[in-house]
Image (cartoon, grey):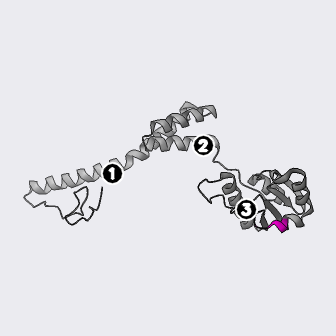
Amino acid sequence: MTSIQVFDPALCCSTGVCGVDIDQALVTFAADVDWLKSQGVPVTRANLAQQPLAFAADAQVRQLLQDQGEKALPAVIIDGELKSSGRYPSRDELAGWAGLAVARSLFTEPVAELVAIGAAIASNCEPCFKFHYDKARKLGVTDADVRRAVDLAQKVKDAPARAVLDLAHRILDKKDALGAIGVSAAPKSASACCLPAPAGGGASKCC
């Protein structure tokens, strides 16, 4: 069975989410390692700051450090063969080295920009729309696809407003109908919403 060894540079942890700044390369690689393990591929990782003896014990890694210093890390060794150094390999590379098939992701950069454009419409963010529209166009996204993303985002955004308007009309129409035949249409008490906070300092239940 293929085994993978990863020799990381000096890190506080291997997840990439420690401290103030998130290291996206580390986050992505950590997810890829979890995926490899889920496929039954054993993966071990050594951190230069925490397991220096592991680096000294491996002849290839020791030579890398002597020749290039810490810039040679991370180093990835597959079944005893050095496959990459100085960068974290992609999931496709890892899968190929491990002999695994990996489904091609549909979440490409152009798709990501269309999603961002939809989010900009939903949040009424003009700078966001302009930024992601420009980026999408540079990636080859057509205006027709942008328009589809905008229209779909607007439909999703409008759905709650339509639903609450329908509710209001149903309640009012029912009240009018009951009033026409002389039946009391006094509504039941509803929970507080958009009202001033009650005396005593408690918060209102909505808005």
Q: Is residue 61 left or right of residue 131?
A: right
Q: Nearer the viewer, mark 2 or mark 1?
A: 2
Per the model, the C-alpha gap separating discs 3 and 2 is 25 Å
Q: Which residue is mark 2?
A: 111
* Image quarter of residue 142: top right
The mark that comes first in sequence, 2 or 1, is 2
Q: In which quadrant of the rendered image does the N terminus lie?
A: bottom right
Q: Is residue 164 left or right of residue 31?
A: left
Per the model, the C-alpha gap separating discs 2 and 1 is 29 Å
Report x, y in % for residue 119: 49, 44
The mark that comes first in sequence, 3 or 2, is 3
Q: Residue type at mark 3? A: Val
Q: Which residue is mark 3?
A: 33
Q: Nearer the viewer, mark 1 or mark 3?
A: 3
Inspect this view and state whether residue 2 appears.
no
Report x, y in % for residue 65: 87, 55
The mark that comes first in sequence, 1 or 3, is 3
Q: Which mark is residue 163?
A: 1
**Which portion, as a residue range, is magenta?**
50-54
Disc 1 and disc 3 in contact, CB within 8 angstroms: no
Q: Residue type at mark 2? A: Val
* Image quarter of residue 171: bottom left
* Image quarter of residue 186: bottom left
Report x, y in % for residue 116: 53, 43
Above or below for 83 versus 157 = below
Is 143 part of what is drawn in magenta?
Answer: no
Q: Please state which of residues 23 and 108 is positioned toward the viewer in this rendering.
A: 23
Question: Which residue is found at the position 84% from the left and 67% from the top?
Answer: 54
Q: Check disc 3: other Cα within 10 Å, few if <14, some if 14-19, many if 20+.
A: many
Mark 3: secondary structure = helix
